[in-house]
Image (tube, coloured by chain):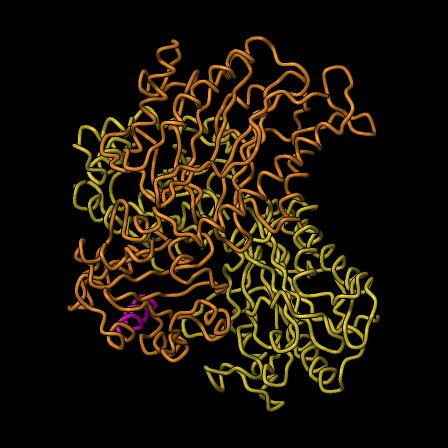
Chain colours: A orange, B yellow
Amino acid sequence: MKRDIDRLMQERGIDVAVVTGAVKGNATMYYMVNGAGISHAIVIKKRGEEPVLLCGTMEREEAAASGLKTIDTSKYNILEMIKEAGGDRLAASVKYYQTIFEEFGVKGRVGFYGQGDVGRNWEFLKALDEGLPDVTVVGEFIDDIFITARMTKGPEEIDRIREMGRKTCEVVGHIADFMKSHKVDGKTLVKDDGSPLTIGDCKAEIKVALARRKIIEEVDTIFAIGRDAGIPHSRGNDSDPIELGKTIVFDIFPQEAGGGYFFDMTRTFVLGEASQEILDSYKTLEECYDAVAPTLEMGEKASVYQTRACDFFEARGIETPRTDPHVRNGYVHSLGHGIGLDVHEKPTLSDFSGNTDTLVPGSIFTVEPGLYYPDKGYGMRIEDVYYVHEDGTVENLTDFPRGLVLEV
Amino acid sequence: MKRDIDRLMQERGIDVAVVTGAVKGNATMYYMVNGAGISHAIVIKKRGEEPVLLCGTMEREEAAASGLKTIDTSKYNILEMIKEAGGDRLAASVKYYQTIFEEFGVKGRVGFYGQGDVGRNWEFLKALDEGLPDVTVVGEFIDDIFITARMTKGPEEIDRIREMGRKTCEVVGHIADFMKSHKVDGKTLVKDDGSPLTIGDCKAEIKVALARRKIIEEVDTIFAIGRDAGIPHSRGNDSDPIELGKTIVFDIFPQEAGGGYFFDMTRTFVLGEASQEILDSYKTLEECYDAVAPTLEMGEKASVYQTRACDFFEARGIETPRTDPHVRNGYVHSLGHGIGLDVHEKPTLSDFSGNTDTLVPGSIFTVEPGLYYPDKGYGMRIEDVYYVHEDGTVENLTDFPRGLVLEV
């Protein structure tokens, strides 16, 4: 949580944190400006002091909504600096930061954060590091202070994610009803004109259902049938018809409109009747889920649950990333991931070496075992979101039946 | 265009270009993988050779859609490298790149491109630069090879932007009709239940109208009334009622769903009757537009048009960024910007020192003069998209009447 930032800066010897870049697609910036609707900004956070927001004059009203002390950057006049530097924009940018850093007393070990252009920032930070004798540019390769702070969520954040969960479940229900509202012709759902209902039709309906709830697809929703459902990240093929008896993996991870908190859930549906093989696999998947999810416990290492899932599947002769890192048939990924302002955050329910993530109060993460058999033409996943309360209670925020078969 | 990349690499002494990061929100990556629906990747482009795409095994099918030679990164086994490095993920990442670079013969001046975490990449590129004796890490601060290549668009790209323009104009027309379909009560449009139609209602309708056309708002559309319309980047206040006689600035810049090409246009509407002052200002704005847009010419510097717009307004006693860099009343921004996979690209129709952008075949950009009087409670902007054909013809892709007053 935000209150952890000063402690983390202290522990890591960071005197000042500088967050740069756009707000959109830049979770740390969004976090620090409290979602203010500005396009891009600089946030300066000195250890032990309140952050200051610098942004352009055209966005002064939006910037004020951040609740932060706000500085209008037009006073630094970058265009004049470019002119003085003879058109050398790198030199002008160093001068611009130098001017700001001097005004705010930014010196010592200065950490840089936020999303931006990799090559541009490499040149810029080199020039800054060399050009400002009082400043040492610092980066954090893994789990930086903001990612670590964001790893736990407070009540306001959880309220927003809970509301996202409510809306997301509504959309999943709507799409299940939408499919069921179609007639069957042979092995396929058909529209009023007799043509097959397709993945593309369902995806179009998903887009409108999301928009009606003012939530957005950051990237295309996964709605994949048959063999594609057997490839975890396949987003589905628009022209595929919705055929009875095939698994549909519906993995939906919308974000608050304007950039903000995500939800993330998956249901697997079969229209009409499922084969015995699919039913058996789904039963195994549910058993894995039921063997692991009830054991989620505050204070436990997040990696433990991936180990449990692998143990469970391997005991049934199913391959896992532990038996084969290239596994494509069986259980082929990690058990889950934190969610928040990014769709993938900490903690990571993965057992890679060095994963020290722990379930603590404020942790919110997915549990998503899956089974994939692309060569047999099917795949399945169940994904819910869990939250660890202050008192250690672990709550499932995903209020939607598991299902599988949708009768038509 | 893409065919320029090898020449640009040659001119700038770059032996290999490495593009990293997500596809979403990372225009250069999207460009290089031809919009393939993968989540993140590494693209290696050696000078004079075809690019190679490296990505995870779970996204192998999506990767194939790029049309590039594709390498499944699971063969490098990063988890094993982390284990070997005793959990040191920075060392493991350097080893990972070293392995890949050796396999593909990547050495010399290696440019890095794409969006990513600034601090993380600073640490990573430092370690790579120091750790690999054959590699010199290079960044380009301004107008890197991909941004420069993307500055001109070929026929396929223009077809996509043209189609985005068609859909965007449809949405603008739909929203104008949507507002006009409401009854008037006193000075305000009202809904069937008698409550005022608000900015929020219109924005909700915009979201659904976009979703129906499978295009997305990357950030919130600008739909601002009255004083907010007088602040160019104000996105509008959801609770404001749609009042007659006030200017509404509707600046809509949607993107192809899944990340892709943008369009960008603005219309200013007044419901019912406009005051004489607003009509006069709008006439001045149209006169500026008509003084500048017909002079757009292949081979001319892009900065010239901002100079012309400033000349025009200043001759009428209106302040501009040239008379006051802090200007808030009058003409307060640049004349336009390129559009493409980012909503703001090159060329820049701005007169800052060192802007050498030129209108050439394949240039596609906005022309968007505006007048802003927040203290008087209004603002206005007209924004169209222009394209320079191979033969020098300059075409307006924005097929929508300028309007101003919408009768109710």
Q: Please tell me how many numbered marks the rendered image carries.
A: 0
Apparent side of residue A269 relative to residue A315 in the rendered image (left or right): right
Report the span colored magenta. Answer: A88-98
Q: Is residue B407 above or below residue A119?
A: below
Answer yes or no: is residue B373 visible: yes
Q: Residue furthest bottom?
A: B317
The answer to if A94 sits in the magenta stretch is yes
The quadrant in which residue A156 appears is: bottom left
Please state the horizontal and vertical placement of residue A363, each as a whole percent of the image. Answer: 36, 42
Apparent side of residue A1 relative to residue A181 in the rendered image (left or right): left
Most foreground residue, B211 or B388: B211
Most foreground residue, B115 or A344: A344
Q: Give the main secondary structure of the magenta stretch.
A: helix
Q: Is residue B101 above or below residue A11?
A: above
Answer yes or no: is residue B384 visible: no
Apparent side of residue B206 relative to residue B92 in the rendered image (left or right): right
Q: Which residue is found at the position 63% from the left and 49% from the top?
A: A213
Most foreground residue, A81 or A175: A175
The quadrant in which residue B274 appears is: bottom right
Q: Which residue is found at the position 60% from the left and 50% from the top?
A: B216
Please state the horizontal and vertical placement of residue A351, each as a whole percent of the image. Answer: 29, 28
Please state the horizontal and vertical placement of residue A396, each as a whole percent of the image. Answer: 46, 36
